[in-house]
Image: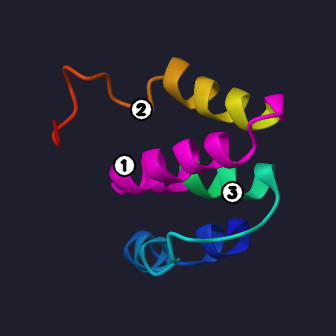
Amino acid sequence: MKVLSRIAKPAAFQGAVRSIPEELSGSIRNCATLAGLELRYDEGSRGIRRLYRLARRNLDDPEAYSAYLINFLVGKIPTLDEAPYS
């Protein structure tokens, strides 16, 4: 994805991000990075769901919760007042 982000036009890259299935397996770091890309490229609800699933599926791993928390603290995850789907 990083290579594609550097060589593809923004619309093509955004289309590639949208084409990735929601149910995906992989390392915590890779899934969190993908969720961050989704949050950055106007796929916020998918990114939030991916981070939430990551945290719930890895209850004993602090890396999964830190990925969710870091995205929340840096403002990538909207608060309940800002959420368009509330």
Residue 70's image quarter? Answer: top right
Indicate which disc, 2 or 1, sits on the residue closer to the N terminus: 1
Snapshot quadrant of residue 37 = bottom right
SS class, disc 3: helix
Q: Is residue 59 left or right of residue 61?
A: left
Amino acid type, mark 1: Gly
Report the amino acid beneath label 2.
Ile
Question: Which residue carries the number 3 mark?
Answer: 31
Based on the picture, tell me whether residue 52 belongs to the magenta stretch: yes
Q: Position of residue 74 (x, y in %)?
A: 53, 22
Q: Residues within 10 Å of mark 2 (few under 14, many from 20)?
A: many
Percent coordinates x, y for residue 7 in the rendering: 62, 76
Quadrant for the C terminus in the image: top left
Colour scheme: rainbow
Residue position marked by numbered label 2 in the rendering: 77
Please identify the quarter of the rendering in which residue 81 is found. top left
Which residue is depicted at the point 68% across and 34% down?
A: 67
Location of residue 12 in the rendering, given as x and y in whole percent from the top left corner: 43, 80
Is 44 on the left-hand or right-hand side of 56? Answer: left
Residue at 34% across, 51% down: 45
In the image, the segment drawn in magenta is 37-62
Secondary structure mostly taken by the magenta-highlighted segment of the chain: helix
Q: Are marks 2 and 1 in contact (CB under 8 Å)?
A: yes
Q: Which residue is mark 1?
A: 44
Q: Is residue 19 above or below residue 56?
A: below
